[in-house]
Structures are given as C-alpha cells and as structure tokens.
Image (cartoon, rainbow, N blue to C red):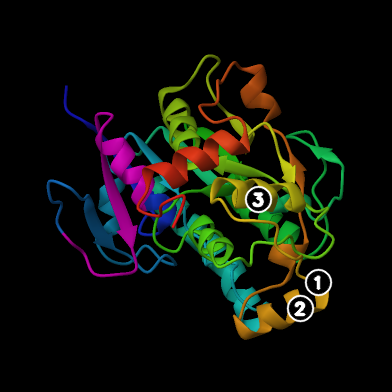
C-alpha cells in the first residue's frame, strides 16, 4: 500500500521538522507548504511547495487532491514585541492561511478527509492556579482573542465530510533549532536558570515525542475516534519555580537567583520579545486524551528533561 500523503502548511519550523521526520517513519509522505522556495523530496527530507499562506494563487492547491490529511501549523511566532504591526501579523497569519486552505479544500476534486488544526493553550489566558481542560472558558486579552478567532475561522469553514480536530497545544519541548528548551538550557548552563517573577505562574509542557504520537493518533482515528477540541499537553504541569529547579537539576547546576519582574521586562525589551511569555502561565490538563486512554511516554518533567538533554548534543554536564 502506498504511503498516505499528509500536507503540512507551515511545516518548515521546529514542530514541522520534527513531525515530518516522524511521519516519514510511519508510512506517511509529508509535503510541506512553505513561504520559501519549492524543493523536491530527498531521501531524508520531504517535498516543499511554495505558497504565500494568504491566497489560493499558484499550484499549491493541487497538493490537497488525494491527500489523507492536512495538519495546519501556520502561525507567525508570538516570540516578539506585541507592537500593533506584530499583533496584526500574528492574527492575520492564522486567519488568512486557514481561509486559504478552506477555499482550496472546497475546490479540490478529492480533498482530504481529515483536518488537524493547531490552536494554542494560551486561549485560556493567565489563570493563576485554576485547572483548565477542554470544558474551561476561554480567557481575555490578546492571546485568547487570537486563539478564539483562529479556531472560529476553522469551524466556520464549509468542509463537508471532513473529520476536524482542534489541538490546543502547550509548550512543546525539544532540542531542535529555535526551540525554547534549547534557549532555556543554554541560559541555565550559564548559571542563570532562576525562576522568573514570582515563579508561581504555571507551565504546561509536552515532550516532542508525545506531540508526534498524539498527532499520529489523531490521523489514525484513535479509539474513540478523535474529533473536536483537545488540550495537547502533559498531564503534570508545574510552576515556573519548580520547572526551573528541575531543569537545573537535570543540567547539574546549583540554585540560581530569581529574575525579578522588572528585570524580565528589561531583558524582554533587549531581546525584542514579550515579557508575558515568561511571567504569565496556565495550568492545563489533557482531560480528553486521558479519558480516552492515551498513555503519555513522558508524563512527568524529570523523565522528559532527562530524555531530551541526554539524547541530544547538549550534554548534561560540562
């Protein structure tokens, strides 16, 4: 049986690279839709097709014909200053790409039967100690507004006979290029791995291996068949203070002084990023996945960090 074709819009980033490599080993043929130039497939990398992520112009809509599924990963990074221009680009990148995909889907003679739509756990906002799952209300502020509009553009699309899954993804941990864990590990190894602000903000995290396995389960249907909204995170979130403590322990680093909130704002300004990414948090649990019997490979942070930092090129000790 030939490998099933999977379309990965926005698949040229950290998550897309990890996911496409994983899918290649599970009898799927990933094809990446990218803003970069088109490139043919090689024995170690998938085919890449250029698109502008806003319209159906060009040849990319043809890729949807006879595909098994689409996994939409498109979204301008939120790791930036929230200027009006950046906020507009963050929102537009998600809404316009989803609409373009829906239009191409409707035109296809044999469109995919599955659409996995990335969303964000930030849709709940900054919620302190409240435990959040699929039944929790969405929050207020820019990030929840983006998440809500993103999901609405997907649910409003006219896609008959399509199984739809919305994945509210938390902080996915891996040691790929531009990954947040790589940055945190480097800082910690320089003895700067203290908690930020009060340290009481919750961090919902997920090992990249579990992320890929959950995607695979969604593609295959699962038991029961996955459909609707899922919180995609490990079952044991931690506070920022405990997360950084575990990271220091894994990297054999001693206690490090906390970074006060004013210094977080100054550092974010110098790094051209948003201090809320370090100071805000949410305590998410994957209620539906647990109820449906998904067994996490890495349910706790110590084992996840040990696996990632032992198996990758960053050693656990100097």
Decide: is 216 above or below 157: above
Taking 317 as reference, is 95 left or right? right
Q: Residue at x 74, y 57 (%)?
A: 144
The foreground one among 52 and 280 is 280
The answer to whether marks 2 and 1 mark residues whose Cβ atoms lie closer than 8 Å is yes
Decide: is 271 above or below 143: below
Q: Which mark is residue 260?
A: 1
Q: Mark 2 = which residue? A: 263
Taking 313 as reference, is 5 left or right? left
In which quadrant of the rendered image does the C terminus lie? bottom left
Q: Mark 3 = which residue? A: 152
Q: Residue at x 13, y 51 (%)?
A: 42
The answer to which of marks 3 and 2 sits earlier in the sequence is 3
| Mark 1 and mark 3: Cα distance apart in space | 37 Å
The answer to whether marks 3 and 2 mark residues whose Cβ atoms lie closer than 8 Å is no
| Mark 2 and mark 1: Cα distance apart in space | 5 Å
Q: Which mark is residue 316?
A: none
In which quadrant of the rendered image does the N terminus lie? top left
Q: Secondary structure at mark 1?
A: loop
Extent of the magenta region? 17-39
* Residue 30 visible here: yes
Q: Secondary structure at mark 2?
A: helix
The foreground one among 255 and 16 is 255
Q: Residue 295 placed where, x, y %?
A: 55, 20
* Residue 67 visible here: no
């Amino acid at each position: 049986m030939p490998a099933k074709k999977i379309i990965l819009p926005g698949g040229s980033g950290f998550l897309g690279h990890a996911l496409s490599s994983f899918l290649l080993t599970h009898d799927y043929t990933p094809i990446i839709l990218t803003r970069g130039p088109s490139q043919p497939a090689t024995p170690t990398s998938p085919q890449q097709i250029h698109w502008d992520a806003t319209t159906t112009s060009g040849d990319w809509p043809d890729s949807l014909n006879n595909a098994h599924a689409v996994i939409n990963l498109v979204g301008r990074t939120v790791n930036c200053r929230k200027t009006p221009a950046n906020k507009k680009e963050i929102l537009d990148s998600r809404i316009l790409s989803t609409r373009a995909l829906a239009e191409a889907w409707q035109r296809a003679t044999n469109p995919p039967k599955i659409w996995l739509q990335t969303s964000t756990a930030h849709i709940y906002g900054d919620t302190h100690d409240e435990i959040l799952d699929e039944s929790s209300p969405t929050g207020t502020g820019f990030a929840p507004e983006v998440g809500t509009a993103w999901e609405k553009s997907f649910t409003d699309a006219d896609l008959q006979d399509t199984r739809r899954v919305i994945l509210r993804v938390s902080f996915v941990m891996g040691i790929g290029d531009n990954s947040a864990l790589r940055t945190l590990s480097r800082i910690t190894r320089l003895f700067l791995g203290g908690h930020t602000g009060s340290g009481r903000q919750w961090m919902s995290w997920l090992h990249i291996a579990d992320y890929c396995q959950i995607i695979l389960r969604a593609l295959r249907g699962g038991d029961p068949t996955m459909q609707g909204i899922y919180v995609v995170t490990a079952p044991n979130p931690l506070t920022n203070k405990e997360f950084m403590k575990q990271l220091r322990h894994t990297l054999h680093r001693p206690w490090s002084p906390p970074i006060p909130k004013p210094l977080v704002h100054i550092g974010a300004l110098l790094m051209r990023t948003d201090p809320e990414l370090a100071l805000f948090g949410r305590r998410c649990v994957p209620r539906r996945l647990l109820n449906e019997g998904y067994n996490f490979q890495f349910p706790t942070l110590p084992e996840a960090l040990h696996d990632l930092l032992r198996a990758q090129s960053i050693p656990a000790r100097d």
